[in-house]
Image (cartoon, rainbow, N blue to C red):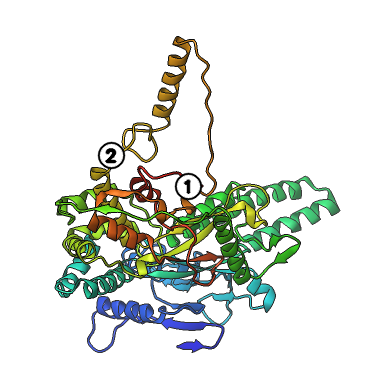
Amino acid sequence: MVFENKKGIVAGVYRPFKSANSQTQGQAFQNLVNDLNNLTKTDMEIIIGGDFNINWSSQKSIKAILDDWAKESGMFQLVDLVTRLRKVQRSDGSRQLQESTIDLVFVKETVKLEVLPSISSDHNLIKVSVNHSGSQAKSRVKKLEMIDWRFYKKERVLSELVPLAANLDIPRPKVLLEDLNTCLMKVLNKIAPKRIIKLRGEKQFINSAINPAKKKRDRYWKKFKKTNDPKFFQSAREETKVLKKLANAEKYRVFKAKMMSHGAKSFWHSVNEIFGRQQSDTIQEFKTGDICITDSGETAELLSDYFDNKVLSLLGKSTSSLKSRQSNLRPEWSPLTLKDSLRQLKRKRSMGPDKLPMIFIKDCAPVIDKILLIIFNSMITENWYPYEWKLARLTPIHKKGDNRLVENYRPVSGLCTLSKVFERCLLNRLDNIVTDSSEQHGFRKCHSMVTVCLELQHYICRGLDAKKATLAYTVDMSAAFNLIRKDLLDLSTIPSKLSNILMNFLSDRFKFVEIQGERSSLRRPSGVCSGPEVVQSSHQGSEPCP
């Protein structure tokens, strides 16, 4: 039986001992699991309960099947107490009381659960309470869209991707890129689907055994206060110990459920909650001058304006022109170049506007490496760059001071994952062409802050040996990588086809600011939303920005 309204879905289940239509018990149970799986494909609140005729504490094999379905559907099984008391006859003719947990409740939401005795059945009553007290309840609910990585495996990714990749249209690279993105998203959504996780400020579960133990302890304390009898005092202390054990067991069960059912973010949220390290990640208001803004959409626009104005205030007039050289070098990339570039990228689960994590792209590399090579080489020879790859999602990161002031935030660009692969290939090719200055220590292999200090020490020692004064000064460039002046780039050492794709890469880019789920309007950034490595490699020999 299924009941549905605007607030959610309630489903009642009964699994009989004997199956119908000549089905085996295993087939009937699998059909039940399939029905439950179809029922839970919804974002609404849902409660599934009933008589499953499964002893939850002893039938491990059947319990494992339900556990797998619950994890895949984002559900929790809450009942861990006895739900049925029945007198059974033993082989010697005597009768004994049999206890079992066969009535189960699966939920996605935070609920209150109580097991109550029944006078009309050998099954206990299970009372499930969901709080729908208007705006006050809604204010405690926070929805998070997360990727469920629990069943993600590289072997499953490759097995799902191989038949889809075989049907791609290879001769047309631009169409091939669109089809490749569609295939990748289809496989990712199947292997690691998105889940809507709802969190509440209150405790996730309430064990029905805690309240009776608390009441029993309070009764002993009242009797002790009235009579001063030591036996009531001792009984109260014993009940306090029982209550502490139940509370600790409940905390462990809540933590274990969060750890198994949510992603890494929820796991560490639970760890910080235990150690008292919780911090509110939701800022109620932002300030600009004497104006306070509470709307997330207006805040996103405010931060976008601030990031643009910060760069515009540093820009000067453009006067120089770009020059490139003709070269006999083949600009196309080899399979080895792409393989090395993918190997250098980190296996992260963070995503850009394309919603494809880098760990997924690296796992798909054995299947899509030839396809990516065709697309990248076509982009270089024909000088085209996908519009989607020029879109950047800016996330404001708090640097210091008052977190309500926009001046204390810096932008971090989230780029499309495939564009990061292209950028790494471009960087590796530029590193083979551009000869770095000996004084350049940033973004170079085998160079770091240690080599800077050694070179500075060398200059100081040489001045001391010559009995001369040594003067050192440092310059901190504000918004260094937000202020890319394309007109000051020196491309004279780069072949024409590489310089053309580099300028296409840097031109006509768009960005939006996202904060607390709200986005600003699309804008052309004053700087360039790309990684610093490409900018540094293409900036050799150029004059410093004013």
User: x, y (%) of residue 487?
Assistant: 41, 55
Q: Looking at the image, which residue sits at the far front?
A: 319
Name the residue nearer the viewer: 298 or 114: 298
For label 1, the crowd category at 10 Å Cα-Cα, with few meaning under 14, some 14 to 19 and many 20 or more, is few
Which residue is at 50% across, 76% downward?
123
Name the residue nearer the viewer: 506 or 276: 506
User: x, y (%) of residue 517?
Assistant: 54, 68
The quadrant in which residue 190 appears is: bottom left
Q: Of helix, strand and loop, which one carries label 1?
A: loop
Answer with mark 1 or mark 2, whichever residue precedes in sequence: 2
Disc 1 marks which amino acid?
Cys
Residue, disc 2: 435
Residue 126 visible in the picture: yes
**Residue 456 sits above or below residue 73 on the image:** above
Mark number displayed over residue 463: none
Residue 205 visible in the picture: no
- Check whether the beta carbons of the residues at disc 1 and disc 2 lie within 8 A of each other: no
Which residue is at 25% across, 89% downward?
21
Residue, disc 1: 545
Name the residue nearer the viewer: 313 or 100: 313
Which residue is at 48% across, 53% downward?
483
Q: Is residue 427 left or right of residue 480?
A: left
Q: Of helix, strand and loop, which one carries label 2?
A: loop
Name the residue nearer the viewer: 215 or 74: 74
